[in-house]
Amino acid sequence: MIKLQFFAQVDEAKCTGCKRCEPVCPAGAIEMKEETAAIDVDRCIDCRRCIDRCNKENAINRVPRPSEVLRYVDHSDLDAKQIKTLCGKAGLLPDLPICGCTRTTGRETVAAVLKGATTPEDLCAMTGLRAGCGIYCMTRIFQVFEACGIELEEPPDRRWIKLTLSIGDISRETVARIDETYPQCCVGEDWKRVTQRATRSSEKEGAHG
């Protein structure tokens, strides 16, 4: 959840149609129209990446919104047990943030997918995710989509980065190979502790739901 007081606006007189801004927008708010960038205000999350990419022409500026906008997905009308189950499948605790910048929780992220988000761009436009650094939460976004059964295809004009944020993000097969090559590191033992703890926490959360 984030509160937005500004949005990005293109100065058409300065825009050269270079398209540098379009692929860096995490919310998919920019598209080219007749060789000029156009920004969908309803999707803009004020991350300022387009402004950074347009630093030579200065064709994009931040403009105050008429009133503050809250980007938040209400999950009160959804099945709480289903959300907890999907969070557990994604290895997330429902009420803990998956993003340190926006503090968007696992519960809200799953709710956004259940309410129609089919791409990371949709999810970011609905929740405000990636409005900050936009790096680490991308891994959790992948996990949520996978848990919800949505297969993502990376667009040809942009790059989605999937990072390993903890030992629990490593697959069982990879852990087995590491253990075989470096048995002295006890990676498998640590992996089991982390994944088992996450499973127990998810089951405990579900029992209270």
Image: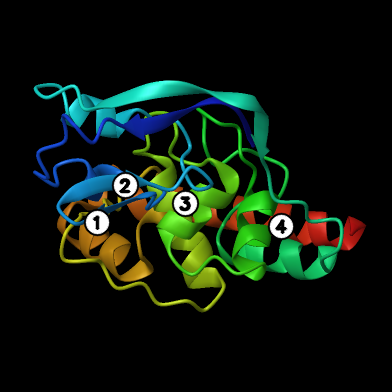
* Amino acid type, mark 3: Arg
* Amino acid type, mark 2: Ala
Q: Nearer the viewer, mark 3 or mark 1?
A: 1
Percent of width and height locating residue 115: 67, 67
Image disc number at residue 202? 4
Q: Are marks 2 and 3 in contact (CB under 8 Å)?
A: no
**Badge 2 local density, few (<14 within 10 Å), some, or many (20+)?**
some
Q: Are marks 4 and 1 in contact (CB under 8 Å)?
A: no
Q: Is residue 67 visible?
A: yes
Image disc number at residue 140? 3
* Amino acid type, mark 1: Lys
* Nearest to the observer: residue 89 or residue 17: 17
| Alpha-carbon span between mark 4 and mark 2 | 43 Å
In terms of secondary structure, where does tag 2 sit?
Answer: strand
**Badge 1 local density, few (<14 within 10 Å), some, or many (20+)?**
few
| Alpha-carbon span between mark 4 and mark 1 | 46 Å
